Every structure is written in C-alpha cells, then in structure tokens.
Image (cartoon, helix red, strand yellow):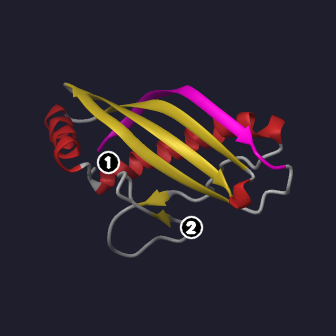
Amino acid sequence: MATIIGGRVVSVEVKRDKLEPVQGLAINVSIEEVAAEKDEMTVKYTLTVTYNENVGKMKIGGLVMLREDAKRAKEITKEWKDKKKLPDEFAEVLMNGITYACAVNGTFFSQPLGLNAPVMLMPVRIGKGPVPPGAVTGQTDKAA
C-alpha cells in the first residue's frame, strides 16, 4: 500500500469576483502527471475550488511524493500513462493527502478574500462496496 512521504504546493491562484456571500463551493482534483523512480512516486495535481454564483475561484497546484513497492509503482505509472486511471486503493491514499494539504493551505489563502476554506471534513473513499459512515465517494482522473 502506498504511503505519502512528502509534498508541496507549487502554485496558488485565488480571486474573488463578487462581494456577495458565498453560497457553497465545488472542489475538483485533476491529476496532471504520475511518475515513478524505483519505489518513489511523484504525482502532480491541481485542486480547483469554484465558489457558487461565480463569487470566486481558487487553484492550488502541487506535488505529492509517495513510497510504493517498485513493481507496483511501475504498474501504477503505466496504467496512468495508458488509461489515465489510478487503482482505487492508491487513489484513496492520494486523494485524501491532496484534499488534506489543500484544505490546510487553502485556509490561509482564502481568508484575506473572505472566501470559505476548501475543507472536506470526510475522507474520500473510492471503489465498490459499502460506504463507511462519513466517507465521500468519487473518481480521480480528468474524465470524472
């Protein structure tokens, strides 16, 4: 199973277009690139927050570094390059790491503009089967 060993935000773009109250938000994560070097993987992503009623928008770009079995890392990278799909168990670890990091950092970026922080209070769960209480379901590739 993959383990997150590091990560960083590499770009931030936040804009408030209207002074009206925020009426909700939508969060989308796009996986841009997946690479592996032996048992270390790097995933490049962009998290986009769209505030309803066109009040504003936030984009956070970053990298997540993970450790995975070298053979499995190679398989995951190949599947990403060929199909733009990630295995469910890998995607769950990745998505929870991305949403957590962006929620923490996004809180600091959103406050000066009076926007809501991009916080998802429930863990992401991907795949079939019963959904545990409090889980959010979704897909991770751009086709989602």
Location of residue 107 in the rendering, given as x and y in whole percent from the top left corner: 72, 40
Residue at the disc numbered 2 = 134
Return the x and y of residue 69 as percentages of the image width and height. 20, 35
Dividing the picture into quadrants, the one containing residue 44 is top left
Above or below, comparing residue 110 to residue 39 in the picture: below
Left or right position of 46 against 105? left
The residue lying furthest to the bottom in this view is: 130
Q: Residue 9 appears in which quarter of the rendering?
A: top right
Q: What is the CA distance from the residue labelled 2 to the residue labelled 1?
A: 20 Å
Drawn side of residue 48 relative to residue 83, left or right: right
Decide: is 111 above or below 49: above
- Residue range (magenta): 1-18
Question: In percent of the image, x 32 and y 40: which residue is there?
Answer: 2
Q: Secondary structure at mark 2?
A: loop
Reading the chain from its start, which is encountered first: label 2 or label 1? Answer: 1
Is the stretch drawn in magenta largely helix, strand or loop? strand
Q: Say which amino acid is labelled 1.
A: Phe
**Observer-nearest of 89 and 49:** 49
- Residue type at the position of mark 2: Gly
Q: Residue at x 57, y 36 (%)?
A: 60
Residue 36 rendering spot, x and y as whole percentages: 24, 29
In the displayed structure image, the side of residue 82 where residue 1 appears, left or right: right
Residue at x 26% of width, y 30% of height: 35
Question: Observer-nearest residue: 26 or 35?
Answer: 26
Q: Which residue is mark 1?
A: 90
112 and 95: which is toward the camera: 112
Q: Around disc 2, counting alpha carbons within 10 Å, would you say few (fewer than 14), some (14 to 19), or many (20 or more)?
A: few
Q: Position of residue 78 (x, y in %)?
A: 16, 40
